[in-house]
Image: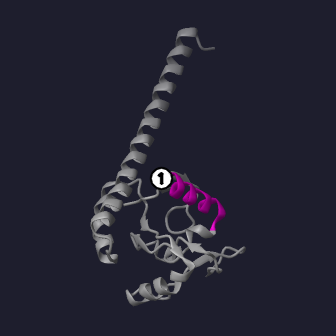
Amino acid sequence: MIRGWEQRDLEKKVANSTQEKVEQLEVGVLRSMEVLHSIASLYAIQAQFGREQFHDFVRGALERQSELQALSWNPWVRATERTTLELKALAEGVPGFEFRELSPSNELISARSRSEYVPIYYIEPLHGNATAFGYDLGSDPRRRASLEQARDSGKPVATAGGVFGSGGPRAFQLGARLTF
């Protein structure tokens, strides 16, 4: 049997521990958002950057922030621009690059025809994430809704866990509309 003062002391310890975990999570999310904003700043000053520049730019953040499992650049692409971007990626040395989506049996297949796509175009680190190249984040209705919300509101939105790489079921993604 726990005495009243012991119960209150235990409740206080649990509350303090919970508050500490919440604050750690908030700091991690804010740090991650700062990385996204820094990528937006890179784009703002240098609208055309390549895979090597993206790799060099995000490498430090990935090394410093263990909460970041991967960073990617995912442009909104109109259907009329799809072939051009796929050919560009192939020319940049990404073998077999094409816009892809998951089939009902969870296999990667060529993305069906749509008016817009949001393919993973750059991703770091490559190890464990290379299969994500070309995956159309907009092909998943839950992700698409979050991406559209971020695009339309201009505010960051968290989405459900990733499909590829080391993300696993516990991961979440942050999407944000970045305008310049």
The number of numbered discs placed on residues in the rendered structure image is 1
* Local crowd size for mark 1, using a 10 Å CA cut-off: few (<14), some (14–19), many (≥20): some
Which of these two is toward me, 52 or 38? 38
What residue is drawn where x is 58% and y is 73%? 116
User: In the displayed structure, does residue 100 sit left or right of residue 70?
Assistant: right
**Label 1 element class:** loop
Q: Position of residue 66 (x, y in %)?
A: 38, 55
| Residue at the disc numbered 1 | 154
Residue 151 lies in the magenta-colored region: yes
What residue is drawn where x is 43% and y is 41%? 26
User: In the displayed structure, does residue 106 sit left or right of residue 94?
Assistant: right
Q: Position of residue 5 (x, y in %)?
A: 53, 10
What residue is drawn where x is 42% and y is 86%? 88
Residue stretch in magenta: 140-153
Task: Establish if 89 lies above or below 66.
Answer: below
Task: Establish if 25 lies above or below 119.
Answer: above
Task: Establish if 56 lies above or below 169.
Answer: below
Q: Amino acid at mark 1?
A: Gly
Q: Position of residue 128 (x, y in %)?
A: 46, 72
Confirm whether residue 161 shows in the render: no
Please identify the quadrant where the C terminus is shown: bottom left
Chief secondary structure of the magenta portion: helix
Please identify the quadrant where the N terminus is shown: top right
User: In the displayed structure, does residue 75 sit left or right of residue 41?
Assistant: right
Which of these two is toward me, 83 or 3? 83
Question: Which of the 4 image quarters holds residue 170?
Answer: bottom right
